Amino acid sequence: MEEIALDMMGKSPAGGAEYKRALVLTLAAPVFWSFGGIGIRLVDADPWVIAFWRAPFMCLTILAFIFWRERSGTLKAFKAIGISGLLASVFLGAGIPLYVLSITRTTVANTVVLLATAPFFSAILGWLVLKERVRMRTWLAILLAMTGVFIMVLDSVGRGRLLGDLLGLGCAVTLAGHIVTVRVGHKVSMIPAVCLAAFICAAATGLMVDILQISIRDIGILAFLGTFQLGLGFCLFVTGSRHLPTAHSGIITLLEAVLGPLWVWIFLGEQPSQGGLIGGIIVVTSLVTHTIVASRHMTRPHSS
């Protein structure tokens, strides 16, 4: 298959000052994303309520970004995503609450590391659904990553965190489904699909719980998460990563798996378990190694 891509738009490699600007913007994205865990930890509300209140702020932020880019073509941009875009919205719309449900039932470290396996799940889905070729190095990286996941899950069984880990894996699978369906519609911008995903999440979770069972303070925290951690983080990634090689942006996104657990450890004293730490290191190592090897392969002439 083609090398795993995490972005929503085609890339046009930049050079010089443009490359540096793109790098800064792309680096800022996982920094924003990494505050999701600590933000959710600070909120005292039902997980479904948390999932709801992040979504509308994320939706409005991305909608403003689309309008800023498209102006009078905003409606046309939404229509252009087609069936594949709608399906991508459903996958991501399901993944947004799964992330919250996972974090409230296991460690932040486990959730963000398990979520980082989404590119590998997208490789498997692409192989099964789109009949894309998966290189041997990717299968080996997947096997190594799944070994790390097994260690993390096994460790969580004895700590009462198994459900949280399984929800984290479910979130990774839905994100993988989103990535694969976005790839099907790669000829058009799929940014509106993310906006629709936030709307779907808000609509679905809003029907499940009393969304008013939350304090003004907690709404403020979730408004920050929806606007900046999710909305602005995504906009920064889309703006910057489209000018970087896929391999570079792929490695950069792994910052979230490092910074997310770091914030809750520094500010809340939440430490990953020994099994979670070992498994996490194995997963991140497999992702980084695979991405670097893939990047080198892509730079060779006539590579296939």
Image (cartoon, grey):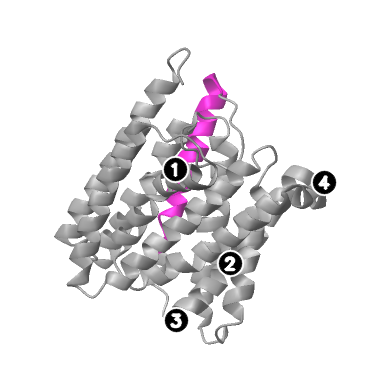
Q: Earlier in the sequence, mark 1 or mark 4?
A: 4
Compared to residue 292, the image places residue 303 above or below, namely above
Image point (31%, 49%), residue name: 258
Q: What kind of residue is marked 3? A: Ala
Spatial separation of the CA atoms under disc 3 and disc 4: 39 Å
Residue 27 is covered by the magenta coloring: yes
Q: Is residue 18 magenta?
A: yes
What is the secondary structure assignment of the residue under circle 3?
Answer: loop
Real-space CA distance between mark 2 and mark 1, rounded to the nearest whole angstrom: 28 Å
Residue 45 circle label: 3
Most common secondary structure along the magenta stretch: helix
Nearer to me, 249 or 163: 163
Disc on res. 80: none
Residue beneath the point at 30% across and 34% down: 289
Which of labels 1 and 4 is toward the front? 1
Q: Residues within 10 Å of mark 1 (few under 14, many from 20)?
A: many
Dot 3 or dot 4, earlier in sequence: 3
SS type, badge 4: helix
**N-terminal label among 2 and 1:** 2
Residue 263 pos. (x, y %): 32, 58
Q: Earlier in the sequence, mark 1 or mark 3?
A: 3
- Could you tell me residue 118's position as x and y percent? 42, 50
Q: Is residue 75 left or right of residue 149?
A: right
Q: Disc 2 residue type?
A: Ala
Real-space Cα separation, disc 2 to disc 3, in angstroms: 15 Å
Eye-nearest disc, 3 or 4: 4
The residue identified by callout 1 is 123
Q: Which residue is mark 4?
A: 73
Q: Quadrant of residue 58?
A: bottom right
